Amino acid sequence: MIVSAPAKIILTGEHAVVYGQPAIALPVTSLRARVEVEPSTDGFKLIAHDLQQTIQYMRHIQENDALVSPLQRVITLTLDAIGKPLPEVSMHLRSDIPIASGLGSGAAIAAAVSRGIAAAVGVTLDNHELNQIVFEAEKFHHGTPSGVDNTVVVYERPVYFVRGNPIESVSIGAPFYIIIADTGQPSPTRLSVADVRELVEKDPLRYRVIIERIGSITVKARRMIELGDLAGLGDLLNQNHDCLRDLAVSSDELDHLVAAAHKAGAFGAKLSGGGRGGNMIALTTHKRAAEIAEALRTAGAVRVIITEIRQ
């Protein structure tokens, strides 16, 4: 048995979403975390191949060990939700989602592991329950997560998200292509979120305006998506990137790739995720996708992914 969960990208609204502004996030279904569940004769074992970790879970450790890993926390949260003991299985975790790159690898891994445990004991977690588990696990990664990663990874559909409100699906007026280009630099979301919070607290009059502008951009972006207006959406992505630069979460590498995407004919481009590294995204059509992807590789992107967004 194999269960999985996808990567995600944030189209608009990162960082501002922490302050009650909306964000739009999209699943990247071609990149996934997968868990293969096999019967075991020696109890439960979680083998995280990419992380080179093997976890043989013991409940008492979770109650008093400050060094509990995020994966151990996911196990505890899942057991509390399903109300059953751990199954005697070996779970093999593999992921093709780059770690610390703004693609939601932590949320996808948590969702896949939780689904695997539940499925092994014959329980199906509904999306609401799973979303709560993954959100709690995300706190290990990001400190004060926005809730975007877990929501789009669990529900696996484009979402319009406002923290504390029910998620809303985004209607896609016309298919479009997003090109994801990886700078090769780690993206420390926890640190960048904390640094933005420090800016907002030190100079709220200046930085609250930027946060609110990002929120306004996201509201307009949803409308452009619904209308299928790619030129209008691209302009909003450019504006969003400028705002993120003002929040000091871009980088030379990100700005360089954004400029390369513009030069190659993208409708718009911006960083995606925590910033300071990780990924940028470019908006285009199928006709131009390969050309823009090649331009980003030439500009130094260590990995380029083309993904189609449709209803």
Image (cartoon, rainbow, N blue to C red):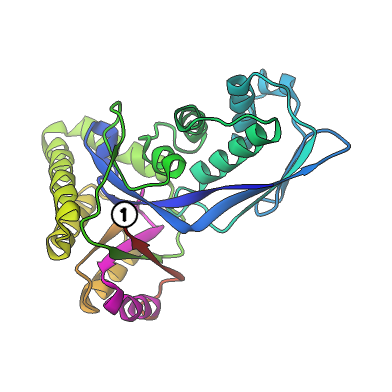
Q: Is residue 47 magenta?
A: no
Residue annotated with mark 1:
311
Give the answer, above or below, for where 71 lies relative to 35.
above
Residue displayed at 30% across by 26% down: 164
* Of 223 and 71, the residue lying toward us: 223
- Which quarter of the rendered picture does the C terminus lie within? bottom left
Residue 91 location, quadrant: top right
Residue displayed at 17% across by 34% down: 203
Q: Position of residue 276 (x, y in %)?
A: 36, 54
| Left or right placement of residue 2 versus residue 285 in this view | right
Q: Position of residue 148 (x, y in %)?
A: 36, 39
Q: Is residue 60 visible?
A: yes
Give the answer, above or below, for where 91 lies relative to 197.
below
| Left or right placement of residue 111 versus residue 18 in this view | right
Q: Is residue 242 visible?
A: no
How many numbered marks appear? 1
* Of 204 and 138, the residue lying toward us: 138
* Of 72 and 243, the residue lying toward us: 72
Numbered range of the magenta stretch: 272-297
Q: Is residue 281 magenta?
A: yes
Residue displayed at 33% across by 59% down: 309
Residue displayed at 26% across by 46% down: 170
| Left or right placement of residue 111 versus residue 60 in this view | left
| Left or right placement of residue 18 versus residue 96 in this view | left
As helix, strand or loop, the secondary structure at mark 1 comes to: loop
Q: Position of residue 29 (x, y in %)?
A: 46, 56
* Of 284 and 103, the residue lying toward us: 284
Give the answer, above or below, for where 191 lies relative to 261.
above
Query: What is the residue that sits farthest to the right in this orientation?
Result: 41
Q: Position of residue 257 (x, y in %)?
A: 31, 70
Residue 96 location, quadrant: bottom right
> What is the three-letter code of the residue carrying label 1?
Gln
